[in-house]
Image (spheres, rainbow, N blue to C red):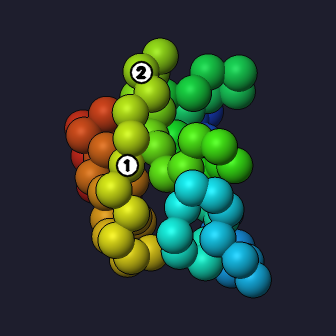
Amino acid sequence: MVFPDGAILEIRIWSVPTPVPPSAHGFKYALFYGHPGHRLICYDNERGKGDHRHHGALELPYRFTSIEQLLADFRADVEKLRGEAI
């Protein structure tokens, strides 16, 4: 999704046969909101790091409980930054 101000929202979620270590669930995901070349919010999991979120330059652990909660948390962060519901 591309917003009128040029911001991009991209959600990619894959079901994987084995968890991406150290994650314990069967999903690989990357949820991005920002502008070309400028990440504002990102939730992802990668080998060696596990589940985490980026808020600007900060990288913090994320407690994954479900895909539904992941999407709700991401949406809340994006709406907070945009100052509007998406």
Question: Measuring 52% from the left and 70% from the top, which residue is drawn there?
Answer: 24
The secondary element bearing badge 2 is classed as: strand
The residue at which mark 1 appears reads as: 62
Marks counted in the figure total 2
Asked if residue 54 is positioned above or below residue 84 in the image, the reply reads above
- Where residue 39 sits: x, y (%)? 57, 27
- Where residue 73 sits: x, y (%)? 31, 57
- Estimate how packed mark 2 is, as few (under 14), some (14 to 19) or many (20 or more) residues with alpha carbons within 10 Å: few
Circle number at residue 72: none
- Left or right: where 86 falls relative to 48: left
Mark 2–mark 1 Cα distance, whole angstroms, equals: 12 Å
Which residue type carries mark 2?
Leu
Residue furthest to the right in view is: 17
Circle number at residue 58: 2
Q: Nearer the viewer, residue 4 or 60?
A: 60
Question: Measuring 55% from the left and 50% from the top, which residue is drawn there?
Answer: 50
Which residue type carries mark 1?
Tyr
- Left or right: where 5 falls relative to 21: left
Confirm whether residue 25 shows in the render: yes
Question: Measuring 64% from the left and 71% from the top, which residue is drawn there?
Answer: 19
Q: Nearer the viewer, residue 84 or 15?
A: 15
The secondary element bearing badge 1 is classed as: loop
Residue 32 figure quarter: top right
The quarter of the rendered structure image containing the N terminus is bottom right
Asked if residue 23 is positioned above or below residue 56 in the image, the reply reads below
